[in-house]
Image (tube, helix red, strand yellow):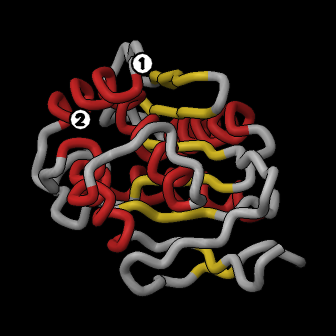
């Protein structure tokens, strides 16, 4: 399989060299069992689903497959997908299902040869607010103020911030952010662009 990028963790501050005249298509993905946020050039959406603790394996698989398929359809063809990484301190709930869903989405993107960047939750919060421990409500408020977006859910706001981070890393920021916020880009797992295209 030929891919445009190889995944690696770069040194802080490493950014690709944008090709003159190129406009990048970037998607931001906040993966969730109950409300996945997706941000693309077309705007933001949430993909809500519900499940029950007593759901069978087949029902759980059907739900995860539905979310993953809907995400990939909404993403379409992009140059980069920025997905929020797992929260390592997350406890309770459906840990296996969340992890499985995350990998289903990543696998589907990679199968379509879409480069994937993994953004830690604290990096997303820091880029949006300047504080890595900011709550989702603060990220929602910051996203709406900075980008003039109307996000119906905090999942959509998270996805928008992830998309903004990818565009900023590619040298095409949605808008200027303080350097302290931009420092969050250094803590992410970005695809290696290799030689200038």
Q: Secondary structure at mark 2?
A: helix
Crowd band around label 2 with a 10 angstrom C-alpha radius: few (<14), some (14–19), many (20+) = many
Q: Nearer the viewer, residue 68 or 79?
A: 79
- What is the x, y in percent for residue 178? 26, 50
Total label count? Answer: 2
Q: Name the residue: 69% across, 63% down.
A: 18
Residue 161 lies in quadrant: top left
Residue 96 lies in quadrant: bottom left
Q: Is residue 180 left or right of residue 147?
A: left
Q: Secondary structure at mark 1?
A: loop
Residue occupying the far front of the picture: 20
- What is the x, y in percent for residue 150? 40, 13
Q: Earlier in the sequence, mark 1 or mark 2?
A: 2
To which residue does mark 1 refer? 149
Which label number is shown at residue 139?
A: 2
Which label number is shown at residue 74?
A: none
In the rendered image of this protein, does residue 103 appear above or below residue 186?
above
Q: Nearer the viewer, residue 113 or 61?
A: 113
Residue 129 can be seen in this image = yes
Q: Name the residue: 10% across, 52% down.
A: 133
- What is the x, y in percent for residue 17? 66, 71
Crowd band around label 1 with a 10 angstrom C-alpha radius: few (<14), some (14–19), many (20+) = some
Q: Is residue 114 left or right of residue 53?
A: right
Q: Which quadrant would the C terminus be assigned to in this image? A: bottom right
In the rendered image of this protein, does residue 96 appear above or below residue 135?
below
Q: Nearer the viewer, residue 164 or 121?
A: 164
Residue 193 lies in quadrant: bottom right
In the rendered image of this protein, does residue 52 appear above or below residue 111?
above
- What is the x, y in percent for residue 170? 59, 59
Q: Nearer the viewer, residue 43 or 154?
A: 43
Q: Is residue 41 left or right of residue 45?
A: right
């Amino acid at each position: 399989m030929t891919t445009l990028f190889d995944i690696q963790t770069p040194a802080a501050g490493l950014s690709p060299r944008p090709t003159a005249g190129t406009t990048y298509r970037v998607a931001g993905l906040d993966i969730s069992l109950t409300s996945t946020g997706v941000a693309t050039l077309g705007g933001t959406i949430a993909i809500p689903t519900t499940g029950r603790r007593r759901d069978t394996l087949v029902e759980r698989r059907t739900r995860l497959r539905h979310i993953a398929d809907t995400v990939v359809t909404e993403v379409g063809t992009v140059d980069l997908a920025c997905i929020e990484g797992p929260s390592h301190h997350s406890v309770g709930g459906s840990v296996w299902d969340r992890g499985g869903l995350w990998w289903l989405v990543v696998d589907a993107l990679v199968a379509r040869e879409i480069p994937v960047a993994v953004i830690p939750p604290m990096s997303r919060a820091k880029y949006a607010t300047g504080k890595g421990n900011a709550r989702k409500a603060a990220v929602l408020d910051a996203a709406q103020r900075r980008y003039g977006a109307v996000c119906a859910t905090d999942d959509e706001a998270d996805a928008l911030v992830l998309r903004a981070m990818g565009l900023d890393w590619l040298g095409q920021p949605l808008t200027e952010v303080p350097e302290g916020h931009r420092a969050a880009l250094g803590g992410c797992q970005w695809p290696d662009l290799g030689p200038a295209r």
